[in-house]
Image: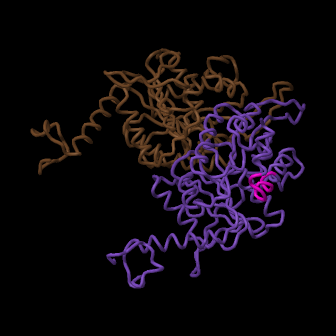
Chain colours: A purple, B brown
């Protein structure tokens, strides 16, 4: 340790033989920065509420971008340490991160989507991760800094429910996040929680790309009658009340559940379904946001007024 | 501080004027013990997965027991710090915990159900709780030890998704937990996560009362066609594979969502619905477990083989 240590090793003549713990911290930060600089766009999918379809949205978004010009250039970080679902939804369960002398590599999914998930590190399918916050923070940090993500156009981050350790860690570790996509189901119970996540994103200064309403209405495949199982319109309501863009509604479709269970994104397996069509419109709005963040925001809030 | 402090203030002659931090810890533990000794049965509702209906199950379980002999003797601890849903589901939003000179009191719900939730402490509906693990642990501890719960027959604890800080804290703070009830939806994606929660409960040595399958099948109100929106049978599968009791399936019913949004437990509002009938059978099994924990376990595992 040097007495004058300011934690900036790059300008320190004694850095080489230094064993101050701050050096390790500095190196970690530099590594994180170097990895993240190679990824052009970082987008998190958040909700606050569980079971609303964050992972389904993440997986299908990644697939959508990979299919439309970004093969081998999309990554997914499954930041749900306790309940990772991304590997199951992409048919990647049982795979492991590849640790070879030159680095640790993500698991390769369809169309070259690079996936990192806690699931790839567990010894058994049924093993829970019984960790408190600090360990989860550490894991997420390592997922971002120690994995050889390489050059990517997009990194989608699937966040767990809540506004605690994992979302907070991700937001702090990636200060240049392009934006977050909120997912809700229409019910008021879900709205109550998702509204808190909107405030959370605002408090942290992360742009809100918009809200997706998932599980919106259900059309009986036999008689065509529409039943609002979880109601309809809750996503628009949050968007209107809180002045954030509304991206669209995805109807309930039993095929989505089946496709997820089978490890296939529904947009590829059921390309002509109303859900896929709705999802395509949502992706277009996200693309427009990425091209011009201010334009979409103004337009959508105006439309919702 | 005394040099020979063993943290047991009751047998220490210098306890009166002592300012050792261990005294505070000791007093906290004693307070927690005293509060919890007045509550006969403690049951947690857990899942690992979000959005599967933990809060709906908790609220309706509490209501069911309150209706059948336990008016004014049931409590609910909403341990979901980030996404509290219990107040909304019981029509108690906007209420506050009552702090008067003789103690802090739970909010009183229907049939004298005593409810404690983070929601009763927030200044605004949209305010998120942006806390990391240690603060959440502290809050849960205070909910259990600092609140005047009084004499109760049952305390139902609604846990958030995951197997992290909150579930871990609750299990550690209530070592004599009677058991946990697991909730899942039938999908394989949900099963993957709920299986981890089963292992979690086992690792902590907490009895598993059984698994409830929620959102199991949907019958079109117009034509009567049944559609397995999230599939059917996933709950039984976990029960079978992991040798835990299966408590029953609750069908998808749009009324459940509407009742929850309206702050009314569905078992009282729609007493004759298939969902309520299914729920009543589940409650009977839980009662049998509480009367004789070993009997139900043996029976159910046998039946599932």
Note whether B79 is above or below A38 in the view shown.
above
Given residues A101 and A205, the one toward you in this image is A205
User: What is the residue that sits farthest to the left in this orientation?
Assistant: B13
Note whether A160 is above or below B71 in the view shown.
below
Q: Start and end of the magenta stretch? A: A285-294
Classify residue A125 by image quadrant.
Answer: bottom right
- The C terminus of chain B sits in image quarter: top right
Classify residue B278 by image quadrant.
Answer: top right
- Give the main secondary structure of the magenta stretch: helix
Tell me if A178 is positioned left or right of A168 in this view.
Answer: right
- Name the residue: 66% across, 64% down: A115
- Name the residue: 34% across, 24% down: B103
Is residue A194 inside the magenta stretch?
A: no
* Residue A277 x %, y %: 86, 48
Given residues A120 and A112, the one toward you in this image is A112
**Residue B291 seen in the current view:** no
* Residue A252 x %, y %: 78, 39
Classify residue A96 by image quadrant.
Answer: bottom right
Total residue callouts: 0
- Name the residue: 71% across, 54% down: A58
* Residue A206 x %, y %: 62, 52
**Residue A106 seen in the current view:** yes
């Amino acid at each position: 340790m040097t007495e004058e240590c300011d934690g900036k090793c790059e300008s320190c003549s004694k850095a080489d033989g230094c064993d101050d713990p701050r050096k390790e911290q500095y190196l970690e930060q530099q590594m994180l920065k170097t990895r993240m600089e190679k990824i052009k766009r970082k987008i998190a999918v958040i909700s606050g509420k569980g079971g609303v379809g964050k992972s389904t949205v993440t997986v299908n978004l990644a697939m959508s971008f990979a299919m439309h010009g970004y093969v081998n250039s999309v990554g997914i970080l499954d930041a749900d340490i306790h309940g990772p679902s991304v590997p199951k939804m992409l048919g990647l369960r049982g795979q492991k991160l590849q640790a070879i002398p030159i680095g640790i590599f993500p698991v390769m999914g369809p169309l070259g989507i690079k996936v990192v998930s806690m699931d790839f590190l567990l010894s058994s399918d049924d093993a829970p991760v019984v960790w408190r916050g600090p360990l989860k923070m550490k894991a997420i940090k390592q997922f971002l800094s120690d994995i050889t993500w390489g050059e990517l156009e997009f990194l989608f981050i699937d966040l767990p429910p809540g506004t605690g350790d994992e979302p907070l860690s991700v937001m702090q570790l990636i200060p240049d996040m392009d934006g977050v996509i909120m997912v809700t189901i229409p019910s008021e119970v879900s709205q109550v929680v998702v509204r808190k996540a909107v405030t959370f994103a605002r408090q942290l200064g992360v742009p809100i790309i918009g809200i997706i309403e998932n599980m919106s209405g259900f059309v009986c495949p036999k008689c065509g009658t529409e039943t609002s199982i979880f109601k309809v319109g809750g996503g628009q309501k949050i968007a209107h009340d809180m002045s954030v863009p509304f991206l669209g509604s995805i109807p309930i479709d039993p095929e989505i559940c089946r496709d997820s269970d089978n490890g296939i994104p529904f947009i590829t397996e059921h390309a002509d379904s109303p859900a896929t069509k709705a999802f395509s419109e949502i992706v277009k709005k996200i693309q427009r946001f990425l091209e011009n963040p201010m334009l979409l925001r103004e337009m959508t809030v105006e439309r919702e007024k």
